[in-house]
Image: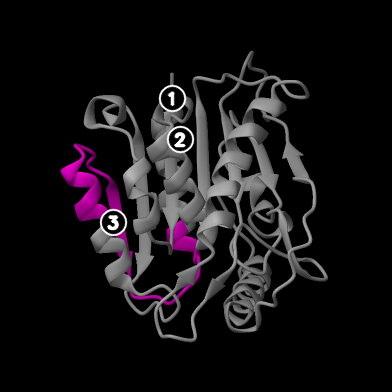
Amino acid sequence: MVIKKHFWICFSILILISIFSFTIMNSSKEKTTLHYLVRQPKTKITNPPLLLLLHGVGGNEQNLFSFANDLPDNFLVVSARGPLSLGPASFAWFQVNFTSGHPQINEQQAEAARVTILDFIESLKNDLDFDDKQVYLMGFSQGGIMSYSVALTEPEKIKGIAVMSSRLLPEVKPLIADEKRLEKLKVFVSHGRQDAVLHYPFATDAVSYLQTKGINPEFHQYDEGHTINKQMFDDVNLWLKTNSAH
């Protein structure tokens, strides 16, 4: 697979915009419907697995969809827009404040977003054909947070999650399913050791917690910041291909 150099330059710019948005988030509570983009499977398959892409703060449905064409051919790929509008082409799943040096979230919005994503997946069945036993979430930053929150609380509805440069909310832990319900959930975690937005210990803490719940994530670490580079993409792509194979 060849990924053009200019794509990674453009994607890095989008990541920088997302990072900047952590510090300029306004108090707008305007909500939108969950707009989304679709890439149909490249191979003819009945009831393909679904891969739902979830962007970070300040991003939109275009961000991760930028490399949808290079994701595994067998997936139906859907990229969703967060429900909170922060400005032109800038959205989030919930508000977060970093002024204290530690992320402080709007817990009600985070819970509403968790429920919204579950409802969204259910509603997609009316528009698209996919195997509801093969639903995967792939999220960057806040999109990764939502991937954790959705899958760990409703593991019967999610086959696997790929969480990149993210963290597990302590606020969601009381809702997390027991070990028996979680035993089939597949988890991929990647994080940069130089991440200045969501620091590297967020990843190691999440992995350690998942292990106490009987989950052994595939964990990849990189000498990178808050971003997705080609190696990260290649690693998650291989994980998706391996775990979605019938």
Mark positioned earlier in the residue sequence (3 or 2): 3
Q: Nearer the viewer, residue 89 or 112?
A: 112
- Residue flagged by tag 2: what amino acid is it? Lys
Instruction: Give the total of numbered labels.
Output: 3
- Residue flagged by tag 1: what amino acid is it? Ala
Question: Which numbered tag is attached to residue 137?
Answer: none
Q: Are marks 3 and 2 in contact (CB under 8 Å)?
A: no
Mark positioned earlier in the residue sequence (3 or 1): 3
Q: Residues within 10 Å of mark 2 (few under 14, many from 20)?
A: some
Position of residue 32 measured from the top left corner of the image (x, y, whole percent): 80, 52
Q: Secondary structure at mark 1?
A: loop
Q: Which quadrant does the C terminus fall into?
A: top left
Which residue matches tag 3?
Answer: 206
Q: Is residue 103 above or below residue 174?
A: below
Cα–Cα gap, marks 3 and 1: 26 Å
Q: Nearer the viewer, residue 95 or 124?
A: 95
Look at 42% across and 47% down and name the residue there.
148
Position of residue 244 measured from the top left corner of the image (x, y, whole percent): 45, 28
Q: Secondary structure at mark 3?
A: helix
Q: Are marks 2 and 1 in contact (CB under 8 Å)?
A: yes
Question: Which numbered tag is attached to residue 245?
Answer: 1
Which residue matches tag 2?
Answer: 241
Q: Is residue 28 above or below residue 236?
A: below
Cα–Cα gap, marks 3 and 2: 24 Å
Position of residue 240 measured from the top left corner of the image (x, y, whole percent): 45, 38
Cα–Cα gap, marks 2 and 1: 6 Å
Which stretch is magenta?
A: 206-232
- Residue flagged by tag 3: what amino acid is it? Ala
